[in-house]
Every structure is written in C-alpha cells, then in structure tokens.
Amino acid sequence: MILDLQHEQHQAADPHAGHDMGSMKPAAEAAPPPVVTPRAADRLFDPKAMAAARAQLMVEHGGASVWTVRADQLEYRARKGADAQAFEGEAWWGTDAGKWVVKARGERIDGEGWEKGEAELLKAWPIGPYFDLQAGVRYDLAPPKLSKGGRSYAALGFEGLAPYWFEVQGAAYLSDRGDVSARAEASYDLRLTQKLILQPRVEADLAEAGAATLEGGLRLRYEITREFAPYVGVVRERAFGPAVVAGERAGSTAVVIGVRAWR
C-alpha cells in the first residue's frame, strides 16, 4: 500500500505527465513565430490598405516638389585698375529623389565688358543624407575680346554639406574640344551673432594646359532677414600657368560690397 502511494505521488510530480510528447517537435524544427509588425495600425486594418495610405502620405509630404532661387554673390569689386561686378547663384526645382539645377556666374569689368560668364543645367540625385550627385551640361559665353566662340562642356560633380558644416562642391568638365578641366569650392558660415555671419570661402579652377586660378574670400554679412543679407568683404585672386605667361595680371585683391538673397 505504501509503495503504491509513493508511485502515484511520483507520477503527479512529472510536469509532462499526460502530454503527448510524440507530437512535439524539437525547437530547431518548429516554425518561427510570426513577425511582429512595427506598425500598430496593420494589426487592426488591412496591411495593403495601410501601405497605400503611407505611400500617399510620402507623396504629399516627403515627395512634394519644392524650388528655390538663390544669389550667393551679387557684388561690386573695387580694386587696383578697373573695378568689376560679379554674380554667382543657382536655382533648383524637384523632390528629395531628384532635382533640376541651374547655376550661373559671371564677371564684368568696367571699360572692358564681360570678362567671363557661364551657365550650367544639371540633374541632381541624392547619394546620401547630405550630398547630391550632379550631371549635365555647361556653356561658357565667349568674351568679346576673344575671337573664339562659346564652349560647351559635359559636367559631372557633387554638392553637399561635409562634417562640421562645411559647404563643398566639385565638378569635372569635358569640353566639346576634348579638354578636361575641374573646379572645387568650399565655404563655411561662422555665426558671430544671430544675424552677423563671417564666411570664408575658397575656390580652385584647373583648366587645360596647366592653367589654374585660385580665389579666396572673406565676407561679413548681416541678415536683415534670412532671405536678404548685405555684406562686405575682401577677395584675393591668383592665376597660374598660361594666363600669366600670356601677360595677364597674375593676381589682384578687391574690396567687395554686395548682397546675398534667396527665395
């Protein structure tokens, strides 16, 4: 009698007593549990309908087309000899997935007319959170004092915001005459106050046959509004290579006054 009671107590203590162990599979062979969706609405509504709603939301908010027009430099340059007027800016239109970009720049010298002028039409694609890849065409106007006509280029470059908030851009060009050239720019906005910004900027151009120019500038602007900021500054230009050999001025320093505006 005592032995029977001990045997019954042992059976009651077994956690698998009464289970059909033959139908249970090892953990490695069992099907994984269903993936828990991070979207709570998918648990209550049709996931396909919710996916369509999210796509529409991206179109209306993240995929909307936007545009801007910006004049980075619109300035008068007072320097030894003839003074000059210069401009540089760009406009773009598109979405986060792609934009059309138009860039233009030029310089006019008192008594001589346009020294240089160019325009670019580019298509831009994001290649990261802060950078765009740009490709398109560039056309240089022919200065009146030169007998050669204008020149066209194929352009490939990038533009974006580097670490520590440096604005950088660069491009390589292939002209319709087979010449290769390149350009790189970098600038930084040093905010002295909420409205007073000091901007150092450097630009390097490398053309065919070793010709090159280097320009460094320091501009202090006051933002009357974020969209409109007059400035004063100083710019130093330096030429290298064939341009200097041909007798042109190797370098010059100019005091500049201008305005930066965007819309």
Image (cartoon, grey):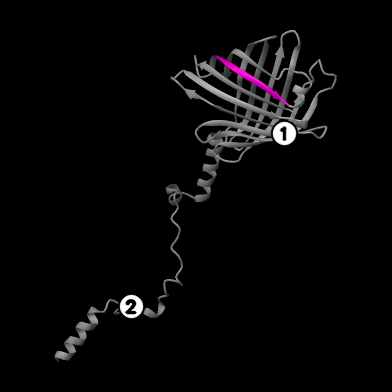
Q: Quadrant of the C terminus?
A: top right
How far from the left and from the top, in percent, is residue 103? 67, 25
Residue 263 seen from this side: no
Residue at 70%, 16% in the rendered image: 107
How far from the left and from the top, in percent, is residue 212? 71, 28
Residue at 55%, 42% in the rendered image: 55
Type of amino acid under label 1: Gly
Q: Magenta segment: does it hold 237?
A: yes
Q: Residue furthest top?
A: 111
Q: Which residue is denoted by mark 1 in the rendering? A: 136
Residue at 62%, 14% in the rendered image: 254
* Residue 222 vs residue 11, the one in the foreground: 222
Prevailing secondary structure class for the magenta stretch in the rendered image = strand
Checking the image for residue 177, the label placed there is: none
Residue 122 seen from this side: yes
* Residue 93 vs residue 194, the one in the foreground: 194
Q: Residue furthest left?
A: 2
- Magenta segment: 231-240
How far from the left and from the top, in percent, is residue 10? 22, 83
Q: Quadrant of the N terminus?
A: bottom left
- Residue 30's place in the image compared with 135, above or below, is below
Q: Which residue is denoted by mark 2 in the rendering? A: 19
